[in-house]
Image: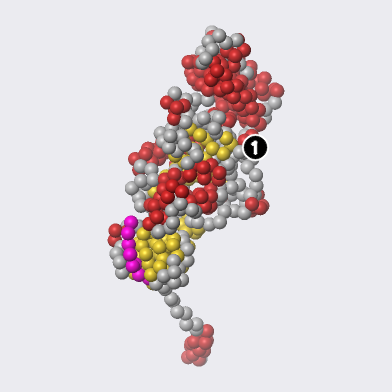
Amino acid sequence: MATDQIIKSLKEKIASFEGKINVTEFGQVISMSDSIAKVSGLSGCMAQEMLVINEDIPGLALNLEEDTVGVVILGDFSKIKEGDKVKRTGKVLSVSVSDQILGRVVDPLLKPLDGKEKIVGEKEMLVDRIALGIMARQSVSVPLQTGLKVVDVLVPIGRGQRELIIGDRQTGKTAVAIDAIINQKNTGVKCVYVAIGQKKSKIMRVIGELEKRGAMDYTTVVLAGASDNASLLYLAPYAGVAIAEYFMEKGDDVLIVYDDLSKHANAYREISLLLRRPPGREAYPGDVFYLHSRLLERACRRNDEIGGGSITALPIIETQGGDISAYIPTNVISITDGQIFLESSLFYKGIRPAINVGFSVSRVGGSAQIKAMKKNAGPMKLSLAQYRELESFSQFDSDLDPETKKILDRGAKTVEILKQDQFQPLPVALQIASIFAVNEGLLDQVDKQEIKKWETEMHNFLNTSKKDLLVKIEKVWDEEVKKMLQQAIEEFNQSRTK
């Protein structure tokens, strides 16, 4: 009986057997130079497909030509020579992401750079994919507080927005972005900081500051340093946004910083010229606009029907001599929803953050502000506009009428109150208290030189004795709350004069 069952079982297995042939397509390196390999024999290769050279060196198919494939090497290209074997993987470039990525420093292929254990992936995320359609999005209406008064008041950022940070080198662009990351503590917002072509020593200092302030717990750093080859610099922002999309699809809000896209464009230009793509304006290939638009379009706020979540992008662009009309700055300005313009002259005057309020704009505006901030931002914008207009005329005329002197004095104090130290982001209620004080003339009796000290002491006073009021300010803004805040600041002013 047992023999009959065995024979029957074998017959069934033989009848159901399907001979599957595992076919792997191989090619051969025909030329190799500067991290770019020309490969023949891969007729079925896809664009952006991952290839493996010599069994262990990853490559990315970027150019599909008639007889050859242009491959960008993502590993040590010094080990590759003519005649080496290239294998297709059949997979478009993707990275494996999980919650373990938070608090880590990784390269664009998500390999650890912090000496810690390997990251175990949970979900494969395409590195380069089509942005979410317009029907799946909703309008930007929830503020993303940066903790910087001048940004949150005058150029507010909302969750799902793309706000460009632009300016010359050494004007504090990275500082603005890092303050925004630090300010996301206890808000539930995940952060991704993508360092493209930066000195590794600078990034280690940034990571040190984030760790010191407990911000690395919810932040991932994707690092492609200045010493890395151009292919990793090209890949870094796409790997960063793939991580951000993983969290967005779980319904989380994400802040991503690209520092900076000027170096990304330069890396892409280098790769394109080596791949023999025709150069256009300033030697950039014609699709350099598409390079950044398809990256930044992935920042959005998903509607609640598909699970919510958002990606807010802060791309950074470096200008030369304040020239925002150059090719890459104009490209990225046209893609984003506004820009924060940092100016060298303001930086050297000691106005920090060195943001030029006249050139900076947010196309989302008041939609991304809480009611109290929106009501106080309007008068401040008007006051600053009047001050800027009169300031240029006042230097030619020493005999000014009292009204003009009052506008100039209050404008100078407004500029002073908007100054802020690095790594010192402020809660929104304290920002509103400072703006309200200058708008209502509660600083008129304070010397300009004393304003910083006055503000610090006033914040300490509110934090210790008016905590309930600070909570109220964030939730409602009516005549009663306005009156309570005025009384609180007047009470503080009186205590100072005693």
Residue 383: x and y in percent read 60, 22
Q: Position of residue 212 (x, y in %)?
A: 41, 36
Left or right side of 484 for 174: left
Query: Quarter of the image holding residue 318?
Result: top left
Residue 29: within the magenta?
Answer: yes
Q: Which residues are magenta?
A: 27-34
Residue 104 visible to an observer of this rendering? no
The residue identified by callout 1 is 367
Q: Main secondary structure of the magenta part?
A: strand
| Residue drawn at (59%, 16%) of the image | 407
Residues 343 and 187: in front is 343
The residue located at (60%, 26%) in the rendering is: 381
Q: Secondary structure at mark 1?
A: helix
Name the quadrant containing residue 163.
top right
Horizontal and vertical percent position of residue 483: 67, 20
Q: Is residue 174 above or below residue 469?
A: below
Asked if one can make out residue 133 in the rendered structure from this viewpoint, the answer is: yes
Instruction: Answer whether residue 361 is magenta in the image.
Output: no
Residue 388, placed above or below residue 181: above
